[in-house]
Amino acid sequence: MKNVVIAAYVRSPQTFAHKGALATLRPDTLVSQVIAGLVSKTGIDSGSLEDIIMGCAFPEGEQGLNIARLSGLMAGIPNSVAGVTVNRFCGSSMQAIHMAAGAIQMNAGEAFICAGVESMSRIPMGGYNPMPNPALFNTLPAAYISMGETAERSGSTN
């Protein structure tokens, strides 16, 4: 089995939602600065990257479209490098790492940037327009509970 390693990491500072200097910063701007910092720190040829895989629990508004691709371009990553945004709610950035590790194991690339982005200041909790399916909500309302409630109700369908 091929060895997969995390060669380097960087992160942005963080603050409480709606407080501090980051509250007014767009998430795509913030994550593009982190990507540029990682490339600078490692000295990697960004053209050798296979993909930017980015987790985002609410990929809409300023962190919508394909924030992985767009923030990579904003960071100066070449147009030849792909980008994919992953939504697995609280596990989104970990899923990005799993996807890259699996791709490396399958010889589908050697170097990836994995990231996560979420602005609790700029994107409202639950997104801008949550619309649960009425039929599913009536028959299985637990399908729409939050990740925290999921952990607390493990095994329950209520």
Image (cartoon, helix red, strand yellow):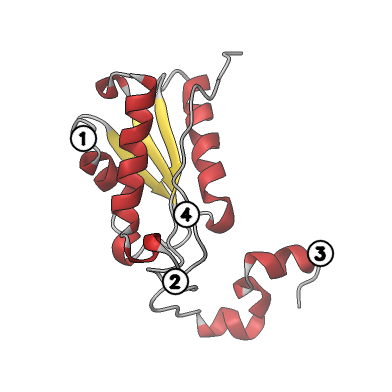
Horizontal side, residue 78 vs residue 118: left or right: left
Q: Which mark is residue 10?
A: none
Horizontal side, residue 74 vs residue 92: left or right: left
> Which comes before the other along the chain, label 1 or label 2?
2
Q: Is residue 140 among the parts visible in the rendering?
A: no
Q: Nearer the viewer, mark 2 or mark 4?
A: 2
The quarter in which the N terminus is drawn is top right
> Which residue position holds label 1?
76
Q: Secondary structure at mark 1?
A: loop
Label 4: few (<14), some (14–19) or many (≥20) C-alpha neighbours in 10 Å: some
Q: Secondary structure at mark 3?
A: loop
Q: CA distance from mark 1 to mark 2?
A: 29 Å
Please state which amino acid type lies under the numbered disc 1. Answer: Gly
> Which comes before the other along the chain, label 4 or label 3?
4
The quarter in which the C terminus is drawn is bottom right
Percent across and percent down for residue 11 are: 46, 41
Q: Which mark is residue 155?
A: 3
Q: CA distance from mark 3 to mark 2?
A: 35 Å
Percent across and percent down for residue 25 are: 32, 60
Q: Is residue 29 among the parts visible in the rendering?
A: yes
> In the rendered view, would you say 60 is above or below 40?
below
> Which residue position holds label 4?
87
> Which comes before the other along the chain, label 3 or label 2?
2
